[in-house]
Image (cartoon, rainbow, N blue to C red):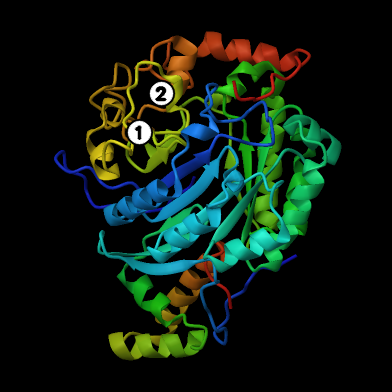
Amino acid sequence: MSARVIIASVSVPALPRHVKFHFNKQREQWVILAPERLLVPDETSVEILQMCDGKASVDSIVGKLVEKYAAPHDVILKDVMRMLQDLADKGFLVA
Amino acid sequence: MTTMTKTKPETASKVQAPLAVLAELSHRCPLQCPYCSNPVQLERASDELDTQAWCRVMDEAAAMGVYQIHFSGGEPTVRKDLEDLVKHANDIGLYTNLITSAVLLTKERVEKLAEQGMNHIQISFQDSEAANADRIGNFKGGHKKKIEVAGYVRAAGLPLTVNAVMHRQNLHHLEDVINMAVELDAERLEVAQVQYYGWALKNRAAFMPTYEQLSWATEVVEKARESLKGVLVIDYVVPDYYARRPKVCMGGWGRRFININPAGLVLPCHAAESIPSLKFDSVKDHSLAWIWENSEAFRKFRGTDWMPEPCRSCDRREIDWGGCRCQAFALTGDESATDPACELSPHHEEIFGLASDEAHKEPPPFVYRKIG
């Protein structure tokens, strides 16, 4: 029996093997594919997902976004954690 | 199938490509479930598309922008070339899903399928209790075999969906079915109430639950979703006989899905052959893209122009897209009629009153699915 994945700032998120994050050339669109599921992530989500490589921690992902957008750390951390937890609960992310 | 997607606005001139292809590789199946979603007239093995034809069709689908392919049936594992088809789909970037009864699978074959790029396997279960499950599928030892194969699937590192078809003769085991899915380490459970067309309509009185049984089941699912959050995703399909509004069948006719039958006929949904007036085109004669855009069967109920009143002026017309055409035909004899699942249909009360009466009587014996 598996347990719920809880995302923390030290978590190292990655996509599980059966979840495919890819660019559909015909539609010019990033998509997340999973069993009977299809998600079209928005631009910000695409950027975050590209960093979910099983090496970078949530902290380091947030750090890069804070730098790039010159936005407050707390705000970005909260948004990223919420998005990643939501994806984990849908089975699209492991950590 | 559940999809969550944002799509670009549609224009009249351009039909958006389908999201997924349902490839019915064969109507052959060792099980004889009396609620089978296949048509009552089944295609024979000698009429099935060959490997080359399926590969060409998959190429055409990928070129259209299709994301996923579901290998289904009948029982898709009766095809000896399944591994080759999976490999080809994977090579051209289609997300591959196997919808199987699992009783013909071995450990070696599951491993081979995983090697060839299978992304996900869905196994159907008839119940959590072996004796009743085997009775429903009319296949001795089937349940035990499914449990074994589910283990092979997880051992091969593949994600597993348990598809449990529920009805009045197993609904009382729903809690056990949920526990079974957790014990099998499934990622996902589909609690699919029988949908009544084809074989299931023949057997409606044997399967239809009462409103009270259904309400109880809905409560069980809601509780389990909360307690198993992040552990098991539960999709829940309710029979729309007790609904006030129809289901969004297939995400709308000719909008999201394309179904190819074993002989190569291209259908807007797996039950569409139950509507005798519809003419289908074959992948043997036309490209998939041509069929999707031009085939009469797809154009007939695509969009909202075909709708009668009260659908035409209904503010939900682009939410449910008129519900299920197969159900409208099966229950009213008119495929263009308002889906009787809608309470605005003049047939709603009579038909669903009848079904509710059936649900309160002793269930009749099954009419098992068979070819010929």
Q: Position of residue B36 (x, y in %)?
A: 61, 30
Q: Circle 1 sits on which residue?
A: B253
Q: Nearer the viewer, residue B315 or B183?
A: B183
Q: Position of residue B123 (x, y in %)?
A: 65, 48
Q: Chain of mark 1?
A: B
Task: Specify whether residue B343 is in view.
Answer: no
Q: Position of residue A91 (x, y in %)?
A: 56, 64
Q: Against B30, is A57 above or below? A: below
Quadrant of residue B336 within the rendered picture: top left
Would residue B315 appear left or right of B159 to someone viewing this image? left
| Local crowd size for mark 1, using a 10 Å CA cut-off: few (<14), some (14–19), many (≥20) | many
Q: Residue at x 36, y 43 (%)?
A: B256
Q: Are marks 1 and 2 on the same chain?
A: yes
Q: Circle 2 sits on which residue?
A: B325
Q: Nearer the viewer, residue B261 or B144?
A: B261
Q: Residue at x 67, y 22 (%)?
A: B208
| Local crowd size for mark 2, using a 10 Å CA cut-off: few (<14), some (14–19), many (≥20) | many
Would residue B122 appear left or right of B137 to someone viewing this image? left
Looking at this rendering, what residue extends furthest in the front direction?
B46
- Which badge, 1 or 2, comes first in the chain's sequence? 1
Task: Specify whether residue B59 is in view.
Answer: yes
**Amino acid of disc 1:** Trp
Badge 2 element: helix
Q: Chain of mark 2?
A: B
**Amino acid of disc 2:** Arg
Point out which mark residue B220 bears: none
Q: Against B126, is B306 above or below? A: above
Q: Residue at x 31, y 27 (%)?
A: B297
